[in-house]
Image: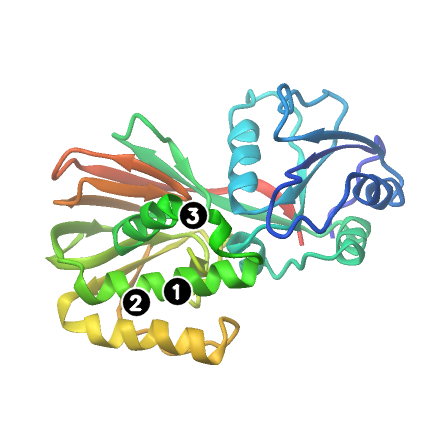
Amino acid sequence: MDRIAADKYAHLLHNPKAGDGDHVKADLINTVASCGFTCQYSSVKEKGWGRLKNKATLVVIAGGDGTVRQVMKKLLARKVLDKRLAVALLPAGTANNFAKTLGVSGTLANLEDTIADWNLRHIDIGAIGNLRESKFFLEGMGCGLLPKLIKEMDERNPSDVETADQELDVALEKMVEIAETYRPKRGEITIDGTVYEGNYLLVEVLNIKSVGPNLELAPQADPSDGKFHVALLKEADRGAFVTYVRNLRKQGRKKTMRVPWKLVEASQEITIRCDNRLIHVDDELIEVRKRQPITVEIRPGIVDVLV
């Protein structure tokens, strides 16, 4: 256990529109304050939310994966000599993939216990090269089925679903529909010096276990072990992948099943060259040139998260 700092000042960053919107401002502030912190509240939907006070020792993020990325982007932009902050999570989004990999639940009681215990986990970050639009990922990046799914889900009418669980189910159904007809694209992926080449439905570099609608692509992934997992899905495994996603809908997203795609561990550098023109970095979509080489390096232990 790492010792809690004597100067107990927290900055609470909240997305009030995340997920089903269960958590209210007053309850959040009271929970953080009950741990002995002076708590400053900011909504990430308002201007100026990212101005963190110098005396803060803890940042509490109440929101989904997108909110976590927003805040991490601010933290990673801090100067080298700035105070290193601890991060506590209250997952309140739709998928909450990052929090689920860390075993963090979305209850106020769990948040209070997590802050009180003060067990820090040093989280790795993916440093991206030759991509002007984005310099890092927290969860993962890739091309193929996932960017296509994100794009189609973004274009749908949000009034079609009422709860986070319904949205995840709709996304899994859409993934089956896309996977059945998606044309594989040529790719060349170099992982720690070994080249993997072929026609791929999906290429994903993963720091965590699941992406998208809790699609567990790398069941053994650990964001604090100094390694990434690369998922490579070829045309020959299309049918097995579709069956896998259908079973996720039937058996529940919490059930672990054997993955029908190739997984390769990476501990040094990854280079991706593919014919895809659309990639995702966490939940952001980015257009790229065909065969544009994109590099990924691991930056171990960059962010301190309470678990």
* Label whose residue precedes the other's in the sequence (3 or 2): 3
Q: In x, y percent, where is residue 139?
A: 44, 48
Give the x, y percent position of residue 242.
Answer: 28, 72
Q: Is residue 189 rendered to the left or right of residue 36? A: left
Residue 303 in the figure: left or right of residue 83: left
Q: Residues within 10 Å of mark 1 (few under 14, many from 20)?
A: many
Q: Residue at x 59, y 50 (%)?
A: 19
Label 2, secondary structure: give it. Answer: helix
> Do labels 3 and 2 touch, CB within 8 Å?
no
Q: Which label number is shown at residue 222?
A: none
Label 1, on which residue? 172
Image marks 1 and 3: residues in contact by CB distance under 8 Å: no
Vertical relation: 247 (above or below) 28: below
Question: Residue, x 49% and y 71% (percent of image)?
Answer: 253
The quarter of the picture where the C terminus appears is bottom right
Query: Mark 2 touching mark 1, by CB under 8 A?
Result: yes
Task: Judge the density around disc 3: few (<14), some (14-19), many (≥20) Cα neighbours within 10 Å.
Answer: few
Name the foreground residue: 103 vs 296. Answer: 103
Horizontal arrangement in the rendering, residue 236 relative to residue 14 (left or right): left
Res 193 seen here: no
* 115 vs 155, nearest the viewer: 155
Amino acid at circle 1: Leu
Amino acid tagged 3: Asn
Give the CA separation, mark 1 to mark 3: 16 Å
- Residue on which disc 2 sits: 176
